[in-house]
Amino acid sequence: MDPNDTPQQRTLRGDAVVEGRGLFLGQPVTIRLRPAPVNHGVVLYRTDVTDNGQPVRIPALIHNVTQRARRTTLKVGEVAIETCEHVLSAVYGLGIDNVRIEVHGPEMPAGDGSSMPFVEAIQSVGVETQDQPKRFFTITEPVTMDEDGAMIAALPADRASMQVIYDLDYGQGNIIPPQVFAYDMANETYARQVAPSRTYVLESEAKALQQAGLGMHLTPQEVLVIGANGPIGGNHYRFDDELVRHKVLDVIGDLALLGCPIHGRIVAYRSGHALNHRLAKRLHQMLSARRRTDLLAGGGVMDIRKIGRLLPHRYPMLMIDRVVEIEGDERAVAVKNVTINEPYFTGHYPGTPIMPGVLIVEAMAQLSGVLLSRKLEHTGKLAVLLSMDKVKLRRPVVPGDQLVIEAETVRVRSRTGHTRCRAFVGRELAAEAEIKFMLVDAEQE
């Protein structure tokens, strides 16, 4: 593709509103889809739940997925938003990169069980092109996830778009006949070919869900219920293959959690949300590794002298050498070059030198301090280490390794900050942790 023809990022022209009740919980909810700046991504905000006076922010990324049956739920801390796949599918299907989705309630509105309410809301305000190229992830090697007879795979493709091919086959004797549907995002017919397809359940499943206290409010106008002779309650199929089209809708919504459009072929057989999430997680790992490689080839944004002006640490306790990327106050990436000249190698397994795990965690904490300083720059506050949770050391780090550290902001309150960190050697995860800081007045230090 000619670089001059690279598609630009897109957002909404104005605010779009969708109201209704949640599919599973049944509570009233209003969502507002709003324009967002370049590189903002798709971010959800629970406006009915505040954190330090601000709505709780939940980026639509795979690491924020929490396990729920039959749906995609995003969660940060104790705050969740249920059933996000249909709105994410609409956003991805219409080629939107940056949007702020404000949700007043615990779950997305169900509408008629399809993505059309969100598509129509977006179309009512229009989409505008932004002055920044899209960032794509191109599949260069096959990736397959399978479980209990179901499968989903991401394969290289011969065109710069995402194609989804879904084979729906519940087996011989099932009341739902086998169906296959293929959709190419390059066709830009999502609103006609995919979005109208509705969520469906078998009549026996619907009764079981309601016996469990879920979906008590639902009628055939909000979910497609399939009986022995087809849809019940006066419903009719919108397409002969509507059920498999909805599976494609779900795949698109779940893979939107990668955070950028995919160029490749997605092939699925009987895959559901859990398996879709596993594929999205693996692709996100590959995307992160590729971005780290690209970043290391660049010159970086902050050398050791600039880092020293932000952090109180000095040799031998200054554990990061170079910051190679900072995305506002949300994410930072840094490098630590591990050499045999490090003073701790003299006494830490001198025969087989290994970097102490506590110093890897310290390096992650220092990068977190750099990241939080972006938010605290004009507040007169300093970040002081408070606690470390979910610390895991995955592999030894030895002289000659280059440690690439990532830190992302989970939340910042008036008195505390919370980051999620990972450290890599090449493609291998070396360590991870969630780190919390106490924010104190600079005069107290």
Image (cartoon, rainbow, N blue to C red):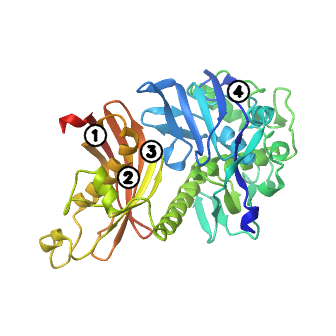
Q: Earlier in the sequence, mark 4 or mark 1?
A: 4
In depth, the one of 259 and 252 nearer the eye is 259
List the residue tagged with mark 4.
Answer: 18
Q: Earlier in the sequence, mark 4 or mark 2?
A: 4
Seen at 74% across and 31% down, the residue is 223
List the residue tagged with mark 3.
Answer: 329
Are the two marked residues, 3 and 1, in contact with CB atoms closer than 8 angstroms?
Answer: no
Q: Is residue 84 visible?
A: no
Question: As displayed, is residue 82 above or below residue 347?
Answer: above
The quarter holding residue 200 reads top right
The image quadrant where one finds the C terminus is: top left
**Labelled disc at residue 421:** 2
Question: As displayed, is residue 361 above or below residue 26?
Answer: below
Mark 3 vs mark 2, foreground winner is: 3
Mark 3 vs mark 4, foreground winner is: 3
- In whole angstroms, how far apart are the C-alphas of marks 4 and 2? 35 Å
Question: Type of residue at label 1?
Answer: Leu
- In whole angstroms, how far apart are the C-alphas of marks 3 and 4? 30 Å
Question: Type of residue at label 3?
Answer: Asp
Q: Is residue 76 visible?
A: yes
Mark 4 vs mark 1, foreground winner is: 1
Residue with the most extreme bottom position = 351
Label 2 SS: strand
Label 4 SS: strand
- In whole angstroms, how far apart are the C-alphas of marks 3 and 1? 15 Å
Q: Earlier in the sequence, mark 3 or mark 4?
A: 4
Question: Type of residue at label 2?
Answer: Cys
- In whole angstroms, how far apart are the C-alphas of marks 3 and 2? 14 Å
Q: Earlier in the sequence, mark 3 or mark 2?
A: 3
- In whole angstroms, how far apart are the C-alphas of marks 4 and 1? 41 Å
